[in-house]
Amino acid sequence: MAATLIKGAEVAAQIRAELKQEVDELKAKHNLTPGLVTILVGEDPASVSYVTAKQKTSHELGFYSVQDNQPPDITEEALLKLLDKYNNDPKIHGILVQLPLPKHIDSNKVLYAINPDKDVDAFHPVNVGRILIGNYAFLPCTPAGCQELIVRAYGDPKGKECVVVGRSNIVGKPMVAIMIQKRQGANATVTCVHTGTPKDKMIEHCRRADILVVAAGVPKYVQADWVKEGACVIDVGVNRIGVSEKTGKAILAGDVDFDAVKEKASFITPVPGGVGPMTITMLMKNTVMAAKLNAGLIKI
Ligand code: GUN
């Protein structure tokens, strides 16, 4: 039986409608307008398109939003000074520095200079620690989007076997931290497999998964015979595997062999149109949380 497609764009639109209502209420009741700055260094085409999409969505939700473009040769010192300005700007509640940064800049030094309460990417060590402890305001956007899709499509992960393929700081590790939380929407039994896991063990672990989250960075990596009948499969991969002769646009594939795996899974995210649309929406959610945190409407 073919799996039900998890349509990320539809879920994202639903969450954005809920957020819009919340933003309208924050404005009316608390005179509070969430503020987001996205900082782009250089003109990498993929980064330009991501940042443009983030700005567009924040405008649609009625945020105060600032796009700050910096030249590719900006010094680390100047970038740190810029962050200091936004850390102290009361109209800005969320700061996002688009990655990757040019090689002459130490990305960690930059990310660690963001005020943790304005760190809407949740990459700062303080936020990473808060998440592990289980007392946090923000979750990293991509794994948080995966969790929303799992809960809304598949249901409560409590007690389920969740296997995460990949251990990046942006997806794999925070995905593990999210799914092991002792709270609603999590409470799963979690295994993480990665490049250090022997292939036969990796397959063995994947076959046990009720929920399989794949962020391996390898096109069509996970095969149908790795997947348990009825599993919920979340594919985080976005790989350019060619160019369409018809449209000239990139042909994308996820990290899962979609056509074969969809015959075994009960739910599966397509690429594109699965996890992707959720990431920006979770950034918007984090910015609303940051505004509320700053105004004292919530506490960590
Ligand atoms: N570049 C690719 N993904 C991300 C992300 O989630 N956050 C930031 N800041 N940059 C990125």
Image (tube, rainbow, N blue to C red):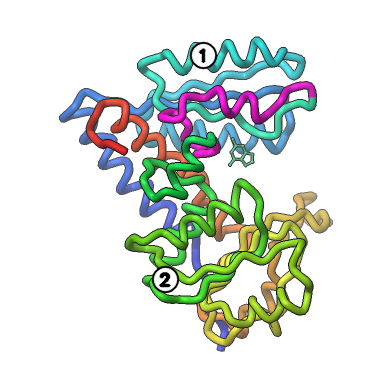
Label 2 crowd bin: few (<14), some (14–19), many (20+), radius 10 Å: many
- Is residue 24 shown above or below 84? below
Instruction: Tell me the residue at 42%/70% (across/down).
Output: 153
Label drawn at residue 157: 2
Q: Nearer the viewer, residue 154 or 258?
A: 154
The answer to whether residue 5 is left or right of residue 194 is left
Q: Nearer the viewer, residue 300 or 271?
A: 300
Secondary structure category for the residue under label 2: loop
Q: Which residue is denoted by mark 1 in the rendering?
A: 84
Q: Amino acid at mark 1?
A: Asp
Q: Nearer the viewer, residue 247 or 81?
A: 81
- Is residue 18 shown above or below 220? above
State yes or no: residue 117 in magenta. yes
The answer to whether residue 170 is left or right of residue 66 is right
State yes or no: residue 15 in magenta. no
Instruction: Tell me the residue at 62%/24% (across/down).
Output: 110
Of helix, strand and loop, which mostly describes the magenta segment? loop
Q: Residue 141: x percent and y percent?
A: 50, 46
Instruction: Tell me the residue at 51%/38% (across/down).
Output: 121
Quadrant of the rendered image holding ligand 1:
top right
Question: For the magenta stretch, what is the residue range?
Answer: 104-123
Labels 1 & 2 near each other (Cβ < 8 A): no
Q: Amino acid at mark 2?
A: Pro
Task: Tell me if residue 278 can be seen.
Answer: yes
Q: Residue 60: x percent and y percent?
A: 40, 35
Quarter occupied by the N terminus:
bottom right
Q: Nearer the viewer, residue 191 or 246?
A: 191
Quarter of the image for residue 94 reads top left
Label 1 crowd bin: few (<14), some (14–19), many (20+), radius 10 Å: some
